[in-house]
Image: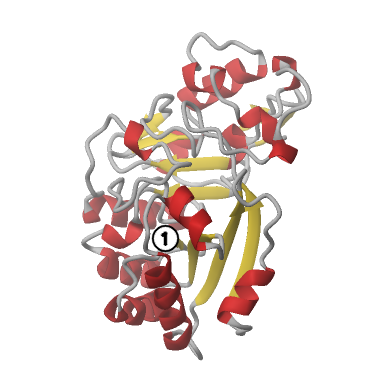
């Protein structure tokens, strides 16, 4: 295995054109499962062409070990799919707590938060993000494509109660879409109250490639796309390992369309600093989209 080193190999910053040391990813996510119990309107889960499955526990442990060795902290056990469906979740989180590096957070739709799962999460999980999206049941029903708003609210209240005086922190997320452009997190405080371990966050929805357009009016681009801007930061900061071991830069790359390697064949450092990753950064910098089919149809430039 290639050993970590203090001065990482110089790489070209594709946005500025200057040569600088390549830092570890600032957002490192592991897709422990790509199975999900929902089919949300904003998500491209129904467009996944790879098998719906779970990451083998031994592979996940290998990634956790390497992340500590190479000083690549793990931020999320999530990409696309519902992490609470992972059959070895308790063992995985327990192993990470003893051997891992980073926050190792869970992002969930919250509908599977039973009492036993809440107890387990307060024991082994550092942080959990729950996507409630809106305090308005009619908006939740449209965006999350289900009618279980009351169940989710009940589950969240249960977790808040059980997590009191534990190390678990809870983030309840609001997402502004065209269905609730004016909504703020004030409604979350009214619904759940104020607690030391609970925070309320707010962001606007983003349109994924080939996905539904739910952008609020204020987020719609005022100009045409300019490929010369080179504003996408993902290849320098984002690193996702998919359930089958494929590694990608982008949270929109649900099918591993622009894979830069596979963890079953190489280690984290070799992939992040490897030729495939360097080539993708170079081609994006120079607006060469022949091999970047996902980037070429990506609407994400609207957010920058």
Q: Is residue 108 rendered to the left or right of residue 10?
A: left
Instruction: Please provide percent x and percent y for residue 203.
Output: 65, 52
Quadrant where the C terminus sits is: top right
- Residue at image position (66%, 13%) is 286
Q: Is residue 96 above or below residue 28?
A: below
Indicate the colouring scheme.
secondary structure
The residue labelled by disc 1 is: 108
Of residues 27 and 46, the one nearer the viewer is 46
- Residue at image position (37%, 75%) is 121
Q: Quadrant of residue 46?
A: top left
What secondary structure is marked by label 1?
A: strand
Instruction: Please provide percent x and percent y for residue 90.
Output: 28, 70
Instruction: Please provide percent x and percent y for residue 176.
Output: 63, 51
- Residue at image position (69%, 70%) is 186
Q: Quadrant of residue 218?
A: top right
Of residues 300 and 284, the one nearer the viewer is 300
Q: Is residue 73 visible?
A: no
Of residues 119 and 153, the one nearer the viewer is 153
Q: Is residue 38 visible?
A: yes
Q: Is residue 259 rendered to the left or right of residue 85?
A: right
Q: Is residue 95 rendered to the left or right of residue 23?
A: left
Q: Is residue 220 above or below residue 82?
A: above
In this view, the residue farthest toward the bottom is: 165
Of residues 104 and 277, the one nearer the viewer is 104
Count numbered badges in the picture. Answer: 1
In this view, the residue farthest toward the front is: 138
- Residue at image position (47%, 31%) is 211
Instruction: Please provide percent x and percent y for residue 292.
Output: 50, 17
Quadrant where the N terminus sits is: top left
């Amino acid at each position: 295995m290639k050993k970590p080193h203090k001065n990482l190999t110089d790489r070209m910053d594709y946005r500025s054109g200057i040569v600088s040391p390549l830092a570890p990813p600032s957002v490192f996510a592991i897709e422990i499962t790509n199975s999900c119990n929902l089919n949300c309107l904003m998500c491209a889960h129904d467009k996944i062409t790879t098998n719906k499955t779970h990451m083998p526990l031994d592979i996940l442990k290998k990634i956790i070990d390497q992340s500590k060795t190479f000083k690549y902290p793990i931020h999320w056990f999530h990409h696309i799919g519902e992490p609470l469906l992972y059959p070895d979740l308790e063992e995985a989180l327990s192993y990470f707590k003893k051997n891992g590096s980073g926050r190792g957070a869970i992002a969930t739709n919250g509908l599977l938060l039973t009492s036993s799962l809440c107890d387990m999460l307060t024991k082994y999980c550092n942080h959990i993000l729950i996507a409630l999206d809106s305090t308005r049941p009619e908006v939740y029903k449209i965006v999350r494509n289900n009618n279980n708003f009351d169940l989710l609210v009940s589950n969240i209240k249960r977790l808040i109660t059980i997590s009191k005086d534990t190390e678990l922190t809870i983030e309840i997320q609001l997402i502004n879409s065209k269905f609730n452009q004016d909504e703020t997190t004030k409604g979350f405080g009214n619904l759940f109250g104020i607690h030391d371990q609970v925070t309320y966050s707010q962001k606007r929805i983003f349109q994924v490639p080939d996905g539904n357009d739910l952008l609020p009016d204020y987020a719609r681009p005022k100009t045409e796309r300019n490929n010369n801007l080179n504003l996408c930061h993902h290849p320098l900061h984002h690193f996702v390992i998919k359930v089958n071991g494929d590694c990608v830069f982008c949270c929109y790359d649900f099918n591993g369309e622009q894979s830069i390697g596979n963890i079953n064949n190489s280690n984290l450092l070799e992939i992040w600093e490897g030729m495939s990753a360097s080539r993708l950064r170079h081609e994006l910098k120079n607006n060469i989209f022949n091999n970047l089919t996902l980037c070429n149809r990506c609407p994400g430039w609207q957010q920058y």
